[in-house]
Image (spheres, coloured by chain):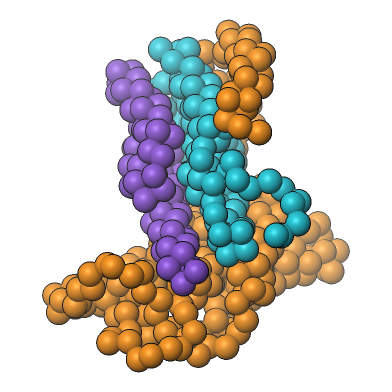
Chain colours: A purple, B cyan, C orange
């Protein structure tokens, strides 16, 4: 059991690092989704199902969608300039 | 093992701050802020965890079975709402900055400079 | 400040924080042996005191209900601020078409995707409502179910296109949902106060354990938070989507 928690913690550290080193915002969106899924797995392993629910719904669906829409609006404004 | 959780928290916070400092694009900066936030989630849930305990839902087993701390889970739920709202606001601000100044590069944007 | 200068300033800051972090890591209770008395007390007493099985819901909406009221107000304020920021610059014409990024290919929507999106959007919305209603019994609650139901709207957008989506979600309706949810929460706090009890005190009959109606006032607060969150997140998505529209120009081939 403890190796599972240890592995999940190390994976979340890794996915956080991946979010930071993806410098292009379009790629960072996917890193954010992956980070959120790994975190939700960690929360589930730490016996917190409510938090895992909330984390998946917010950080995998809503926040990357807002990022994508913002990037699209920026690209459209760039084109009209 | 007992130190690994806190070290991961410190690492996530540190890498998030480093990402914010060396970022060249405002949208990338907002993503790094979310990494800092995830450090707080892991810290709070790590504090409440107990070996051999189940989730704080007493549907199948009677109340009295060992369970992890529900108060810190409520904190993390509030934290996630705050993070989502803050990300939305920051993205709206980034959009407006781009419309007004035409660039999202952190080096070329100085605050309070009058528009040329 | 160039990046180099920022890094030079960052290094001593990280050194100081690193020392503090090491000190704290060595002092924290070891992982898995928490010292939290409040949590243990809630776990032991909450099911008996409030007839709920979900201790986290009881903490969020009953024992620390005032904090969640603050969080709801913050969500409403943040969404209002974002809408003001975006709409203030753009105006409220409603007379626009889809913006297009030049040089990108445009693919027709396949029938299979439209069908799947319609099916799954309905199921997802129903699932979100289910999670809200069962907040006091199983893992879930107002906030989780509200976000799931709000994310079902994005499937509608994927499947039907922007015009269909815009016709189904009217901005005043979403804002009204958000306001009704917030107002219901404030009333749940104010009405017991008006009758001589403390604010947010559980004055309704408590119901049975494992029942859909259990927890008294928590059920109403749960539903209020769910409604407010659906309204907030959908309004946020709508405002952001409106940003990708451009004023009407020459006729576009098909509106996406």
Q: Please, is residue C208 above or below residue C224 in the view?
A: above
Left or right: A20 as drawn, with respect to B87: left
Percent coordinates x, y for residue A58 in the rendering = 45, 53
Residue under the image location 76 percent in, 57 percent down: B114
Q: Please, is residue A21 above or below residue C35 in the view?
A: below
Q: Quadrant of the N terminus of chain C?
A: top right
Residue under the image location 41 percent in, 12 percent down: B1
Viewer-proximal residue, A46 or C255? Answer: C255
Q: Quadrant of the C terminus of chain C?
A: bottom left
Q: Does the image show residue B10? A: yes
Q: Please, is residue C115 above or below residue C5 in the view?
A: below
- Determine which quarter of the picture holds residue B33: top right
Percent coordinates x, y for residue B107 in the rendering = 59, 41
Q: Please, is residue C51 above or below residue B32 in the view?
A: below
Left or right: C214 as drawn, with respect to C83: left
Viewer-proximal residue, B57 or C15? Answer: C15
Residue under the image location 64 percent in, 73 percent down: C89
Viewer-proximal residue, C45 or A22? Answer: A22
Residue under the image location 62 percent in, 81 percent down: C91
Percent coordinates x, y for residue C14 in the rendering = 61, 18
Left or right: A69 as drawn, with respect to C68: left
As drawn, which residue projects farthest toward the front? B116
Percent coordinates x, y for residue B87 in the rendering = 55, 52
Q: Does the image show residue C69? A: no
């Amino acid at each position: 059991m403890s190796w599972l928690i240890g592995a999940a913690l190390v994976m979340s550290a890794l996915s956080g690092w991946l979010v930071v080193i993806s410098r292009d915002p379009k790629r960072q969106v996917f890193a954010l989704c992956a980070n959120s899924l790994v975190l939700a797995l960690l929360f589930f392993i730490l016996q917190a199902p409510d938090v895992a629910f909330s984390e998946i719904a917010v950080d995998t669906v809503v926040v990357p969608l807002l990022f994508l829409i913002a990037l699209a609006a920026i690209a459209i404004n760039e084109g009209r300039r | 093992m007992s130190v690994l959780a806190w070290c991961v928290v410190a690492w996530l916070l540190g890498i998030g701050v480093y990402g914010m400092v060396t970022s060249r694009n405002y949208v990338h900066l907002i993503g790094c802020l979310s990494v800092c936030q995830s450090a707080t989630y892991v810290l709070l849930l790590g504090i409440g965890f107990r070996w051999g305990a189940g989730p704080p839902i007493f549907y199948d087993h009677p109340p009295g079975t060992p369970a992890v701390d529900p108060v810190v889970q409520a904190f993390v739920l509030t934290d996630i709402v705050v993070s989502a709202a803050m990300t939305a606001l920051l993205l709206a601000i980034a959009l407006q900055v781009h419309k007004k100044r035409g660039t999202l590069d952190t080096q070329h944007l100085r605050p309070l400079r009058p528009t040329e | 400040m160039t990046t180099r200068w920022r890094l030079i300033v960052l290094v001593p800051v990280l050194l100081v924080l690193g020392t503090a972090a090491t000190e704290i890591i060595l002092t924290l209770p070891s992982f898995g042996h928490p010292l939290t008395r409040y949590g243990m007390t809630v776990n032991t007493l909450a099911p008996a005191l409030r007839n709920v099985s979900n201790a986290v819901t009881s903490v969020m909406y009953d024992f620390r209900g005032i904090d969640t009221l603050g969080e709801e107000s913050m969500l409403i304020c943040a969404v209002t601020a974002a809408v003001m920021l975006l709409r203030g610059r753009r105006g409220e014409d409603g007379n626009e078409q889809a913006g297009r990024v030049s040089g990108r290919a445009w693919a027709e929507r396949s029938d299979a995707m439209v069908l799947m999106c319609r099916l799954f959007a309905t199921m997802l919305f129903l699932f979100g409502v289910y999670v809200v209603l069962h907040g006091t019994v199983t893992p879930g609650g107002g906030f989780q179910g509200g976000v799931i139901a709000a994310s079902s709207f994005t499937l509608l957008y994927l499947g039907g296109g922007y015009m269909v989506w815009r016709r189904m979600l009217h901005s005043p309706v979403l804002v009204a949902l958000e306001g009704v949810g917030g107002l219901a929460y404030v009333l749940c706090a104010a009405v017991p106060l008006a009758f001589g009890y403390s604010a947010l005190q559980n004055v309704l009959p408590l119901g049975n354990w494992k029942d859909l109606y259990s927890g008294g006032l928590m059920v109403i607060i749960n539903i209020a938070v769910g409604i407010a969150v659906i309204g907030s997140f959908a309004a946020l998505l709508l405002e952001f989507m409106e940003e990708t529209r451009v004023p009407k120009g020459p006729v576009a081939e098909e509106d996406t």
